[in-house]
Amino acid sequence: MEKGLISVDRWTEHSQAYFLTHLHSDHTQGLSSSWAKGPIFCSRLTAKLFPFKFPGFNLSLLRLLAVGTWHSISLVSPSSASSSTLQVMPIDAHHCPGAVMFLFRGEFGCLLYTGDFRWETTSKRAEIGRTMLLNALKDDVVDILYLDNTYCNPSYAFPSRAIVAQQVIDIIVSHPEHDIIIGIDSLGKEDLLLHISHELKIKIWVWPERLQTMHLLGFHDIFTTKTSLTRVRAVPRYSFSVETLEGLNTMHPTIGIMPSGLPWVVSPLENGDKLFGSLLTSRYNRSKWSGNGGNHTEKPNGNLGSVEKFHKYIYSVPYSDHSCFAEIEDFVKLVQPTNMKGIVSSSSCYVDPLYYFGRLCGAYQSAQSLPHNKRKERVERVLAVNNKTTFRCGASAGLERKRAITVKVKSSGIHVSRMSALRRKKRGAKIEENDRPN
């Protein structure tokens, strides 16, 4: 595809059409209320949230794409003025409200851009997404898969969100006299909060701006800004800190819960507090999750292995809206792309997905059938062809909000770093012929 046609989650250069996977801030760097460069294609739910994220935005520039449906977009070659047709299908990314993957088809071949995604295999919603993707691909081969490689490392193994949500319930129930503080972002983790509300038959406190978002999402009776109505509060992640919790505990017993695929602190409590003998472990004392999509294996005398108590007031739970390593591998096996590239340029444990999953790509599989002295030549040739139509990584979109504040925990003398492992630095993508090597 020729330069200057389309861009995905990249807003700094000129294209004829722009695609937005979702509204998290690391995917909207360069996008503002005064945007006027061209039409933006997104899901219906993302469009509904758009005015709140970008007040005063010219909504006539939004093009709504129905999930699971092919859409045709006419483009004009900047060099020859000839017309071409791009086909695109949004597919539920299971990440946050409105988040989608984009499957593109055209003269350039077939490309799949995941954006941020969670590929669980244990829910009905995930099965619908899987069927939708397979039906869309049919006999097409994905020439290049642009993959969310946030947790593309075997060290990231965590259970399904349904399992972790129940772990959060057990933490809350095991502290009946405590206020509960849960750190969340301005968008995402809604399913966790809904589960808590449903299971415990309580309202959840959120800050005023977050309440507006909840109302836009259709949740009108579950959330409140009145602290007197509930002991469970969802607070902005940036305000979640050891110092805050220590201050709250001078007034009333309070614990904090940080849901994230990344550990909230560097080291757990030195005294090895593992939460034995409480309601927290009762549900899981016969089983422990494994990293294969939430399946259980019997464990007679185990504990809640995936929950860590890093501070006397803080629990870290692996509730993530990104795919863990095993889920990424399952997804790559399903798609079987010819080639792939990671869309995360920097993370706490960055690894190029080809390092682990290159063996699953067509370019590498086909090369294995050739004589040894021909393999390198074949791989290089296939990749060179693929690179003629690619999402070229753009300038750094900047780090997602910094969440790293290192403080000394007085009670234990250890240092705690809140999300001090580097959060990822995202880059959007521009589909064009490469004018420089990657």
Image (cartoon, rainbow, N blue to C red):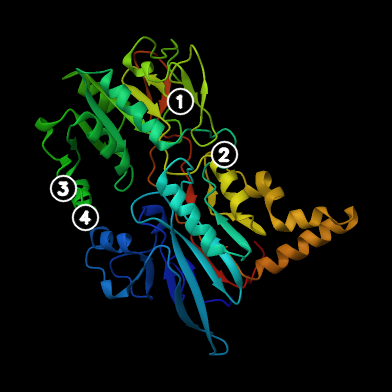
**Coordinates of residue 24 in the picture (x, y in percent):** 37, 53
Q: Give the x, y percent position of residue 426.
A: 48, 53
Tell me the CA gap for discs 2 and 3: 36 Å
Res. 113 in view: no
Per the image, label 4 sits on a secondary structure element best described as helix
Q: What is the spatial separation of the Cα atoms under label 4 and label 1, in whole angstroms?
A: 33 Å
Q: Tell me whether circle 4 and circle 1 mark residues in contact (CB < 8 Å).
A: no
Mark 2 or mark 4: which comes first in sequence? 4
Q: Earlier in the sequence, mark 1 or mark 2?
A: 1
How many C-alpha atoms fall within 10 Å of the one at disc 3: few (<14), some, or many (≥20)? few
First in residue order: circle 2 vs circle 3: 3
Where the C terminus falls, by quadrant?
bottom right
Secondary structure state at the residue bearing disc 3: loop
- Residue at which label 4 appears: 216
Secondary structure at badge 1 equals loop
Mark 1 Cα within 10 Å, few/some/many (few <14, many 20+)?
A: some
Vertical placement of residue 85 versus 326, above or below: below
Which residue was labeled with disc 1? Answer: 306
Question: How far is mark 2 from mark 4, CA to CA?
Answer: 34 Å
Contact? badges 1 and 2 (CB < 8 Å): no
